Amino acid sequence: MNVSRIAAASAVAAGAVMMFSGAASAHVGVQPQGEAAKGGYAVVNVKVPNERDNASTIKVEINLPSEHPLSSVMPQPVPGWKVEVDKSKLDKPLDVHGKKITEAVTKVTWTADGTKIGPGEFQQFPLSLGRLPEDADQLVFKAIQTYDNKEVVRWIEEPTEGGEEPESPAPVLKLSAAADDHHGAAATGAAAKDDAKAAAGHEEEAKPRAASGASSDSTARILGVVGILVGAAGVAFGVLAGRRRSA
């Protein structure tokens, strides 16, 4: 009897832990597709889960960090959602590849247009970002989530290093070490594969040509030897014929 009670209590406690941990982790986040290297460009997913059982998410706003303005911010179309990009003038222009950038995207807003994020669901909104700063280890994107019951959740609390996670933490994008070419390893790998394919193609083309050249040389040598033999036979025949006439 005591064993059964202990088992039941343990099950309830485990369920409570899972419930609270799930609630704590279910917040708006920013996750890179691959690598987000300093000084480079990256594609990230704004992941928006629905935390409510009786309402659906109909609007998501992402505010980009003003202390590290990005010259290029492009949203990927998401079916069932319309997107709006807001820009503002920069106090200090950015120098990107020798070009002066005087304005930058400050906010991206997705509004439901035929679909929603229902209870127990999540939606990802891809963004292409660049050029990422070289003097920062992370970027903080403050987000606002709106439900169809008029409830608004503000994910704007910046986490502190070594501290506890805030109740409504802002999405954070961790930046990795800078790549040599500032374009990521994927492009370099693809270029290397293309170069390897091209080299292999040249080798395959060279093989038949080399074989053909070797065959031509062998044929020429054989014909030369045969010609010499025929010529020698002709000389010998002429000598013998001359001796017979003399006799």
Image (cartoon, rainbow, N blue to C red):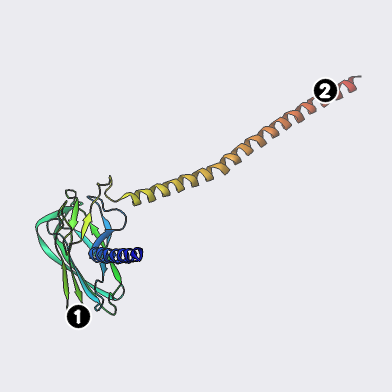
In the rendered image, which quarter contains the N terminus?
bottom left
Total marks placed:
2
* 2 vs 81: above or below: above
Mark 1 Cα within 10 Å, few/some/many (few <14, many 20+)? few
Residue farthest toward the top in the current orientation of the protein = 247
In the rendered view, does 74 fall on the left or right side of 88? right
Amino acid at the residue labelled 1: Asn
* 232 vs 145: above or below: above
Which type of secondary structure does the marked residue at label 2 adopt?
Answer: helix
Residue 77 seen in render: no
Rendered location of residue 59, percent (x, y): 21, 74
Residue under label 2:
239
* 7 vs 146: above or below: above
In the rendered view, does 194 fall on the left or right side of 121? right
Any mark on residue 149, and which?
1
The image quarter in which residue 48 lies: bottom left
Residue 35 seen in render: yes
Question: How far, Cα to Cα, is label 2 from label 1?
Answer: 120 Å
Amino acid at the residue labelled 2: Val
Q: Residue at x 12, y 65 (%)?
A: 88
